Image: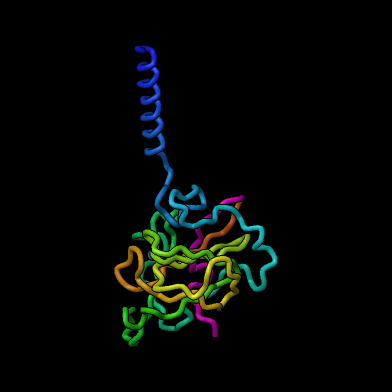
Amino acid sequence: MGRVLLIVIATLCIGVIWLGASGGGPTRTSAWGSQGAVAPASGLSGITQPMQRGRGLPGDPRPYGNPLQVSGTVMTQGYGVGTHAPAEIWGAVDLAIDGNGDGVADPEGTRDKPVYATHSGIIKTTPNSKPAGNHIWVTNDEYRTGYAHLARFAVSDDQVVTRGDLIGFIGSTGNASGPHLDYQVWVMQGGRWVNANPLDYGALDVAP
Ligand SMILES: [Zn+2]
């Protein structure tokens, strides 16, 4: 009896030690942008491996251009700062629209405006996620882009899109103080997704 109790106590101790070790490490569990290094605890992304079926998709696999495609686009939070730090986990840019031409983004001009895919890929939607709200991944073998806080989706899971296809509408779902698009770019490097600066992929460039 005493021996059994000892074993139980020892097992509990090991459990506690293990929990402590895993809690203090660099593991990130809440980031929808964290799938590059660590499998998401919540299954938010649903995509942790390169998608072989993404091969041979029509169109350009490389992200390029402003996902809002309007000249009044304003970047309301830059890459790797504020809630976008550290960049390897949360790297993104926030985009909103100056609807009345005063040089400042405004909710009226931003809310419910269309969001377009910036490259070819396969759609994965996640409704009501935290902190990203209604979220879309567009993924192919080499690149993945994330579109967060959407008011609603214009596409559904496993749909194939190319650059310029309407995928959703700007909202303020999830953790957002107002309507804007949180836009991420990830690049497959050495078998893992690595966060990249969307400005290096023309995130403010509107197609002529
Ligand atoms: Zn953001």
Quarter of the image that includes the N terminus = top left
Residue closer to the observer: 112 or 100: 112
Q: How far across and how far down the image is residue 79, in percent?
A: 42, 63
Which residue is at the far top? 2
For image coordinates 39% across by 29% down, the residue present is 15
Task: Report the colour scheme.
Answer: rainbow
Residue closer to the observer: 147 or 96: 147
Q: Please say if 13 is above or below 2.
A: below
For image coordinates 38% across by 56% down, the residue present is 85
Quarter of the image that includes the C terminus = bottom right
Which residue is at the far bottom? 100
Residue closer to the observer: 46 or 147: 46
Q: Is residue 38 magenta?
A: no
Q: How far across and how far down the image is residue 39, in percent?
A: 50, 48
Q: Please say if 52 is above or below 16.
A: below
Which residue is at the far front? 1
Disc tally is 0
The image quadrant that residue 102 belongs to is: bottom left
The image quadrant that residue 161 belongs to is: bottom right
For image coordinates 42% across by 42% down, the residue present is 26
Q: Is residue 200 magenta?
A: yes
The image quadrant that residue 7 belongs to is: top left
Q: How far across and how far down the image is residue 195, in percent?
A: 50, 57
Q: Is residue 124 left or right of residue 15?
A: right
Q: Is any atom of residue 95 visible in this view?
A: no
For image coordinates 29% across by 68% down, the residue present is 177
Question: Which stretch appears magenta?
Answer: 191-208
Which residue is at the far left? 177
Q: Is any atom of residue 96 visible in this view?
A: yes
Q: How far across and how far down the image is residue 194, in percent?
A: 53, 55
Quadrant for ligand 1 reads: bottom left
